Image: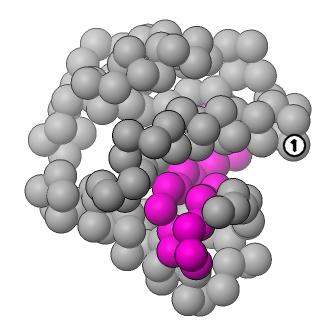
């Protein structure tokens, strides 16, 4: 089991394909939401993931300031269904925030969260800064963490 952070150019084509496949499994198929999952932001992002036996089981996209928001962001946070309940999501967010704070020197982080995850992200210090809105038919809120 290992955690890795790579920029787009460091990902092999096989690993990139696997990441895009697992993101599509979770966000398009599992959540029954047809949307443009490959949105052009991956090449500007860092990719944080956990592997078990060579398989990506948890993933988050780390976006520098200016890609999605004026602030850096964490997005596409996922744990494959069969690996949920093991604390990987919390570890994923902690590692993502540590990378943003330590490597980029950024203290403020903005995210778009599915509404039902407000409490989860709130446990890391994020606070809601918008009313609930629909994004691709799913209720979301924007949240900010200010260090």
Task: Identify the image quadrant of the N terminus.
Answer: bottom right
| Residue 65 visible to an observer of this rendering | no
Q: Nearer the viewer, residue 2 or 114?
A: 2
Residue 118, relative to residue 106: is it above or below?
above
> What is the quadrant of residue 142 in the picture?
top left
Q: Is residue 17 visible?
A: yes
Q: Residue at x 58, y 43 (%)?
A: 92
Looking at the rendered image, the quarter that the C terminus falls into is top right
Name the residue at 18% across, 64% down. 29
Identify the residue at image location x=60%, y=38%.
Answer: 91
| Left-right relation of 42 to 8 | left
Q: Residue at x 28, y 67 (%)?
A: 25
Dividing the picture into quarters, in which one does residue 146 lie? top right
- The residue that disc 1 covers is 103
Q: Which residues are magenta?
A: 48-71
Secondary structure category for the residue under label 1: helix
Is residue 53 covered in magenta? yes
Residue 100 sits in which quadrant?
Answer: top right
Specify whether residue 115 is painted magenta: no
Q: Bin the neighbour count of mark 1 within 10 Å (Cα to Cα): few under 14, some 14-19, many 20 and up.
A: few
User: Looking at this view, is 111 or 80 the one in front?
Assistant: 80
Does residue 30 lie above or below 97 as drawn?
A: below
Count the marks. Answer: 1
């Amino acid at each position: 089991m290992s955690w890795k952070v790579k920029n787009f150019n460091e990902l092999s084509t096989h690993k990139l394909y696997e990441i895009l496949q697992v993101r599509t499994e979770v966000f398009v198929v599992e959540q029954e939401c047809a949307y443009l999952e490959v949105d052009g932001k991956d090449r500007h992002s860092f990719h944080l993931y956990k592997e078990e036996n060579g398989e990506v089981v948890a993933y988050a996209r780390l976006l520098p300031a200016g890609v999605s928001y004026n602030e850096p962001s964490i997005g596409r946070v996922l744990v494959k269904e069969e690996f949920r309940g093991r604390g990987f999501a919390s570890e994923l967010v902690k590692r993502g925030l540590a990378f943003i704070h330590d490597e980029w020197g950024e203290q403020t982080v903005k995210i778009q969260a599915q509404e039902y995850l407000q409490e989860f992200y709130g446990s890391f210090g994020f606070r809601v800064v918008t009313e609930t809105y629909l994004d691709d038919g799913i209720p979301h809120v924007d949240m900010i963490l200010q260090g």
